[in-house]
Amino acid sequence: MHAFVRIVAAASLMSLIACSSTPRNQVIFTAGEKATRTHSFQAGDEFEVKLPLNAGTGYVWTATRFDGAVVSLENAPSPVQSIDYGGRVGAPNLQTMNFACVAPGTCEIVFELSRPWEKGAAAAQTHTMTVTVK
């Protein structure tokens, strides 16, 4: 009987580990992209948006406009994540934002690349994403 309990406990633990390592829905924007992205999710889904930037320039991405009744921003923008470009100095990085789908509806999320201390300055770059939650 004890062996059976250990097997069930081990299987449960492996199931939990597998679930926790499942990647979120990812949306990755590329530098210079101009098109509006359109994505559909289910209520309760989570997704992460990865945006390109060059670290050290002072620029950061912010989600400047979205409908909080449809999606919620789950974290402040993350520290940048390096992309492997063979060790090139000045290579692009990725900044990640995590969202949760709150309720059915459609909203537009606008991301702006700017320097936080430059008040009133136009964004250096923007990306737009239309999200439909079912």
Image (tube, grey):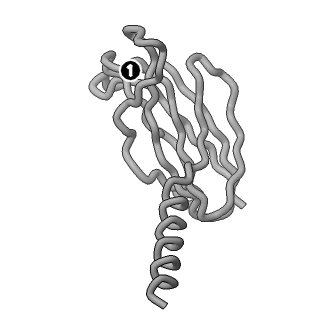
Q: Residue at x 53, y 71 (%)?
A: 11
Image coordinates for residue 134, horizontal then vertical, percent: 72, 61
Asked whether, in this view, residue 75 is left or right of residue 39, the answer is: left
Which residue is at the front of the view, 59 or 29?
A: 29
128 left or right, relative to 93: right
Question: Looking at the picture, does residue 79 appear above or below residue 83?
Answer: below
Q: Position of residue 82 (x, y in %)?
A: 41, 25
Residue 126 screen position, x and y as percent? 54, 26
Q: Residue at x 54, y 67 (%)?
A: 15
Q: Crowding at label 1, few (<14), some or many (≥20) Cα neighbours within 10 Å?
A: few
Left/right of residue 31 with respect to residue 35 in the rendered view: left
Q: Residue furthest top?
A: 89
Residue nearest the observer in this picture, 106 or 24 = 24
Closer to us: 35 or 24: 24
Residue 37 rendering spot, x and y as whole percentages: 68, 35
Q: Is residue 49 visible?
A: yes
Residue at 64% from the left image edge and 49% from the top image edge: 107
Report helix, strand or loop for mark 1: loop
- Compared to residue 75, the image places residue 118 above or below, namely above
Residue, x 59% and y 33% (percent of image)?
Answer: 28
Residue 7 relative to residue 103: left or right:
left
Q: Amino acid at mark 1?
A: Ala
Residue at image mark 1: 121
